[in-house]
Amino acid sequence: MSLYEVRKRDGCARIGLFRHGDQEITLPAVVDTDDLFPSLRQQRFTNVPLGAGADFVRAYHIRGEGQPAAVHPAIENVVSSGDCVMVSNWHTALADPDKYVKWLIRLKESIPPDTAWYAPASALPGTLCMLVYSGFDLFDFRAVDLRSVQGIFCTPLGEFPGEVMDEGLCGCEGCRQGDLHLHNRLAVQSEAALVRNYIRSSHLRELMESRCRADSSQVAVLRRLDTHYPYMERRLPVVRNVSMLANSAESLNRTEVRRFAERVTDRFAPSRTDVAVLLPCSAGKPYSTSQSHRKFIATVAKRAHELIVTSPLGLVPRELEGVYPAAHYDVPVTGYWDREELAFASEVIARYFARHRYSRVIAHLDGGSRTAAEMAAEICGIDLEVTCRGHPASGESLRSLAGSLEGEPGKQTDMVRGVISWQFNEVIATSGMYIRGRGERQAVMRGKVQVFSVDAGTGLLRPTFEGWKMLGRGYRVLIDDFIPQGDVLAPGVTDADCSIREGDEVYVCGRMAEATGRAVMGADEMLRSGRGVAVRLRKVKKL
C-alpha cells in the first residue's frame, strides 16, 4: 500500500510525502525506482504508446498489480487516492506540445489529486522543471543514464559532447572524477533540489519561464498551458505573500494576471462612477507609497476615482492596490510597451469602461500607458480628457490635472467595498464601517464590532463570524457532523463552493460547529482528495 500527501502547492507542482512499504520520500525527487518498485520490471503491457487509439489501449494496456498504477490518456483509468500513477512513454510527449497538454489535462481531470505522478525515463536536467511544473512528482535515472552511454554531458540549459566535462562547466564530484555517468545523475538530482526550493518559495513559474528558453518545445507547452485558463485557474492560489516577477512576454499570460484582470472587469464595484482619472503605475508598491502617487493623491484630493494603468495587470483601481498581485509584481522598467502589452491593457480598460460608464474620464498618462488608454477609448467609445503635459508628476501636469477637477465634489475611496467585491463577488453596504489600526494590525469595524481584519501580506479581508453574516452564500465549505479540533481535512468536507481556490477566506459550516479559516486546497481538490488539510482554521464555534 502507498500513501501520498501534498504538503505545499505551487500551481500544478507540489511538494509531497510519498510512503510506499517502509520507504518515505519527499517529492518531487529522482530515485532508483527499481528499488522503490521491485515488481516494476516484471509488469507487462504497461508500455503502450501515448498516441494509440482507445480500442488498441483497451485491448493491450494493463494497469499492473500493486504500485505504480499504469495509466493512459485514451481510456478511463481506475486509480485510488494515495496511488502512484505511471504514465509510460511521457518522454515522447514533448515532441508534440499540443498533445502534451491535451493528454496531461485529460489525465489530471480524471485521476484523484492526491496521487503521486511518475514519468519513467523522462527526467533530464533540461526537462525536469517542465515535468514538475506540469504536475509530475517522481522520476528515475534512465534518461540521464542513456545520455551517459551516448557520451552526452547534461546541464539544465543544454546538452553538450562529453568532452566539455574537462572545461570546468561544472564542479560536481562526477566532473572532478571524470565520471560522466555520475555527473549526469548528480545534475538531474541537483535540478530536482532546485525545483523543490522554488516550489517552497512559490516562484516555480519564474524558474519555468527561465528554463524553457533553451527548448522551443517547452516554450510551446508553457504557452499552451496558459491558454487553458479554467484548468490552470483552479490550481493557482488566489493570493500569495511573495513577489511576482514579470520578466518575459509569457508573464502577460500568467493565470494570476488574467484572474486579477477578470475580477476587476467582472466583479469589482467602484466607489464612484462620476469622474475617473487614469494614472500611470510606479516602481514602488503599493503605488500610494511612491513619491509620484503621493503627488497624484494630493492633487486629485478625492475628487475622482483613481485607476492605475499598468503592465502586466492592465488596470488597478486604487481600492485594490494592496491586493495580490497588484502590490507584489515587479517588471523591468524601460518605458516601452510592446504590442502584446498594449493589446492586453487596452482590452482590460475597454472592458472595465464598458461595464462602468463614467460621466468623465481623465487620462493623466504618457507613453505606453496613454497609448493603451487611447486604444481602449476607441474600442468602447468614450472620450478621454488628457491632462498630462510632459511627465505626469511635473508641476505643469499636476496643475493641469487639478484644473480639470475644479468644482468636482470630494468622496472617500471605499477600500472595504472594493476589496469585498473583488474577493467575494459581493457588493455590501459599508455605511458606518471604518478601518482601525495600522500596519499588520488593521481591523474593519462597524461601531464597536469587528467585522473583518486586513491581511497585510495579501491585501485580502478576513471575515469574522459577524462579517460572514454580511456576505452571501458563497465561499462556504460544508463539513460532516463533527466539531473540528484542529484544521479541517479533506475527508471531512461534504461540499464546497466551486469558486473556492487555495488561499481564499472561507466559512466552514456544519450541524455541530461553524468556523472561519483559509482554504489550503481549491474546491475541486477538497472534494476529490482522500487526505490532506483542506482548510486551516482560525476560530471555531460550537453550535
Image (spheres, rainbow, N blue to C red):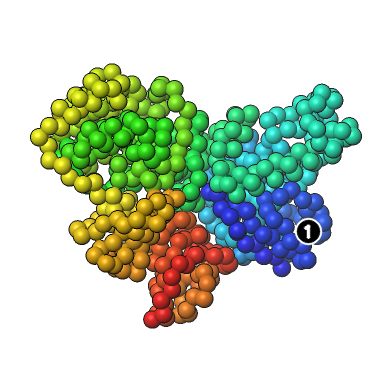
Q: Position of residue 292 (x, y in %)?
A: 33, 30
Q: Amino acid at mark 1?
A: Phe
| Residue assigned mark 1 | 37
Q: What residue lies at 54% left-to-right and 57% top-to-bottom?
A: 110
Image quadrant in which you'd find residue 262: top left
Drawn side of residue 263 relative to residue 364, left or right: right
Residue drawn 28% across and 18% down? Answer: 390
Outermost residue on the top side: it is 390
| Visible residue check, residue 235 | yes
Image position, residue 337 (x, y; %): 40, 24
Q: Is residue 396 left or right of residue 123?
A: left
Query: Where is residue 254 shown, x and y percent of the image?
Result: 47, 39
Viewer-proximal residue, 274 or 189?
Answer: 274
- Give the structural element (helix, strand or loop) at label 1: loop
Between 361 and 397, which is closer to the camera in this rendering? 397
Determine whether, in the image, residue 456 is placed left or right of residue 76. Answer: left
Residue at (79% x, 41% y) in the render? 186
Extreme-front residue of the structure = 437
Q: Where is the N terminus found, in terms of image quarters?
A: bottom right
